[in-house]
Image (tube, rainbow, N blue to C red):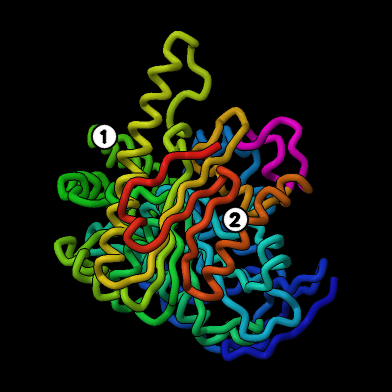
Amino acid sequence: MQTVILPARAGPIHARLADGLLRATGIPYAQAGRWQPPRPLPPGPIDARHPAPACPQLAVERLDAIMPHPFRGLSFSEDCLHLSVTAPPQAQAAPVMVWLHGGSYESAAGDMAVFDPAALVREQGVVVVAATHRLGLLGWLAHDGRPANLGALDVIAALAWIAGNIAAFGGDPQRVTLFGQSSGGDLIARLLTATAARGLFHRAIIQSAPVHLGLRNTAMKPVMRRKAAGLAHDAPLPAILSRQARIRRAVRRFGLAGQMPFGPEFGAAPFPPEADLPRAHAEAAPGLPLLIGHVRAEAQLFLPPQPRPAIEPLRRGMVRLLTRRLYARPARQFAAHHHAAGGAVGRYVIDWGAGPWGGTHLAELPLLFPGPDWLQTPLLPVGMDLDRLTALGAPLRRIWAEFARTGQPQPQRIGGVLRLVTGAQAGQAMPPRKR
């Protein structure tokens, strides 16, 4: 491993050159006190040789079931406004892809080992940035005079840092693609409508995002605010997380919406009122190419994986119904609106996943980010090795990177694993599967 120093507007960045890749990890892109908007940092030397810390968060039982040690090697800190860059060592004006992780706006982190972009960078010559931001009660809910949407403001601050500094890594600040999965994809859908984010990214890939789930939920937020009321500004962190857990219990009665209670509040900076979302999306669409889609059986993750054989047909029916309601239909409608407003659009379905959990929510992530931490998880077939996983995901990584390069979604079919349609077809039902 070799240390290299990169001259950047933010200050000299001390990075690592290892295994043929340039790695700059844990770069602070802004500063913020608790429940305060992010502020720019003064220029100065940056030690970018340690992982970005994760935002403090509650444990997620389903995440732990899939990945026994999801935060291996990471620390937790409220000072989590950091990003990490992985780049080819000799990159020049390369496309930039900015990863926004999922986790229902409450969990995960940009530098989790399962999001290692080494294969994507090495194969495709792109620069990949992973941004970590505030989550849950620390990052999203307006309460007791504290602002909403701090997590979104964090991401916009990260994009501003990228615009000013990514050229130091050989990245092109005029070809920035946001790509995110689940709530990360949902956040991208909202950032399309944020004037403050305009011009900071130029393409968008929205993966497995329930883009309708956060809409028309005006009854839930007041309940959340009541449960958060009275929490002291200097409350110890365990007390904040305990209050967040209480809020989660209180919103269970709101059904599916209560499964992702935190997230954007419309009508509060940086987002327009909910009624104005279609107009704001239409204004942004002509200049912002979009890919949007999902995996075949998204909802499988949220139902028992191995029920009694007698009820297996019922379970499969529920998976189809919930996948169609939460992911397929909203993606189709979002794509149709984007196309009608003059935006280039492609919509995809990924039909892959032979592990015990099948082609479920998260199933495309091992293909995009192949690494040893995915092996022997229920998302992969028993006996899958890293070389095979890396080879299987190569076509998907190529499609994502080519879109980042050109902004032109290309209709294609990859052996039944991925179906991608473009233009007006993206707003219609997918063609039937061919095996």
Give the residue at the far right of this rendering. Answer: 1
Label 1, residues with CA under 10 Å away: few <14, some 14-19, many ≥20: few
SS state under label 2: helix
Decide if residue 308 is on the left or right side of residue 1: left
Mark 1 residue element: helix
How far across and how far down the image is residue 180, in percent?
48, 59
- Describe residue 202's horizontal placement relative to residue 397 as left or right: left
Q: Position of residue 433 (x, y in %)?
A: 47, 39
**Pointer 2 local density, CA inside 10 Å: few below 14, some 14–19, many at least 20:** some
Q: In the depicted view, which residue is nearer to us: 356 or 29?
A: 356
Q: Quadrant of residue 375?
A: top right
Tell me the magenta residue range: 372-386
Residue located at (18% from left, 50% from top): 216
User: Is residue 246 in sight in this rendering?
Assistant: no
Pointer 2 residue? 396
Q: CA distance from mark 2 to mark 1?
A: 34 Å
Q: Which residue is mark 1?
A: 255
Q: Is residue 379 magenta?
A: yes
Helix, strand or loop: magenta stretch: loop
Q: Amino acid at mark 2?
A: Leu
Please state which amino acid type lies under the numbered disc 1: Gly
The answer to whether residue 386 is left or right of residue 315 is right
Residue toward you, 223 or 197 = 197
Q: Is residue 259 magenta?
A: no
